[in-house]
Amino acid sequence: MSKFTLNKLSFNEQDGKDIADFLARYFHAEHSLDGGKSPKIHWGKTSWQINNVLLKGIVYVVRKNENIIGTLGLKECSHWWSDDAFIGDTWFFVRPEFRNVKDDVKPSNMLLEAGMKYAEEQNLPLIMGIYNVGSLDKAEKLLLNKGFHQIGGTYYNGINR
């Protein structure tokens, strides 16, 4: 039996607080646009986005001993040029110490497989983005191994101050 559990969060105060705390503590600390510090958290925007995904989409978490160690937030989106819908990720993150699990199912695989199943149930394609300079190669390999193909890229040119 796996030491990890997969749960779906609900739109309620405790789940919102739990996922906000996790994302601020772990995701934000690692997320970077240029290898430096992550942009400053704006709590109004952050809480609005988390609540929006909890209310209109789906949030999965993987736990070990009741502690969140990874999460995937998904919601229905459309391209700016089309009404064709897809399921898009708002966030996808697993704590670094749980990314290279050898003796159990990988939390990243648990989350991705749940997200892929959800998209299939919605009869919509799933589009995932990699938005962190520090883990690009591993994240790309994970997605390609799950049957995704690359459709573009995100590029950053910092402001010289």
Image (cartoon, grey):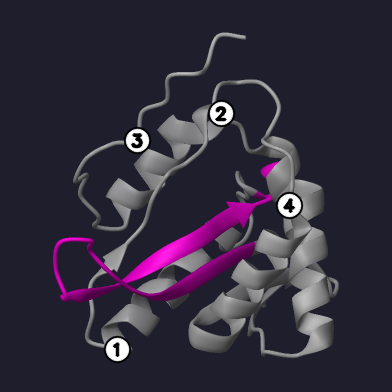
Residue type for callout 3: Thr
| Residue at numbered disc 2 | 134
Is 44 in front, or is 21?
A: 44
- Disc on the earlier residue, 4 or 2: 4
- Disc on the earlier residue, 1 or 3: 1
Residue type for callout 4: His
Image label count = 4
CB under 8 Å between callouts 2 and 3? no
Question: Residue 62: x, y in percent?
Answer: 66, 70
- Disc on the earlier residue, 4 or 3: 4
- Which residue appears at 22% of the width and 63% of the height? 79
Q: Secondary structure at mark 3?
A: loop
Badge 2: residue crowd in 10 Å (few <14, some 14–19, many ≥20): some
Nearer to us: label 1 or label 3: 3
Question: Residue 15: x, y in percent?
Answer: 77, 81
Give the label on residue 154, or none: 3
Residue type for callout 2: Gly
Magenta extent: 71-98
Q: Is residue 121 above or below residue 150?
A: below
Badge 3: residue crowd in 10 Å (few <14, some 14–19, many ≥20): few
Nearer to us: label 2 or label 3: 3
CA distance separating discs 2 and 3: 14 Å
Nearer to us: label 4 or label 1: 4
| Residue at numbered disc 1 | 122
Nearer to us: label 4 or label 2: 4
Residue type for callout 1: Gln
Taking the magenta stretch, the answer to whether it contains residue 63 is: no
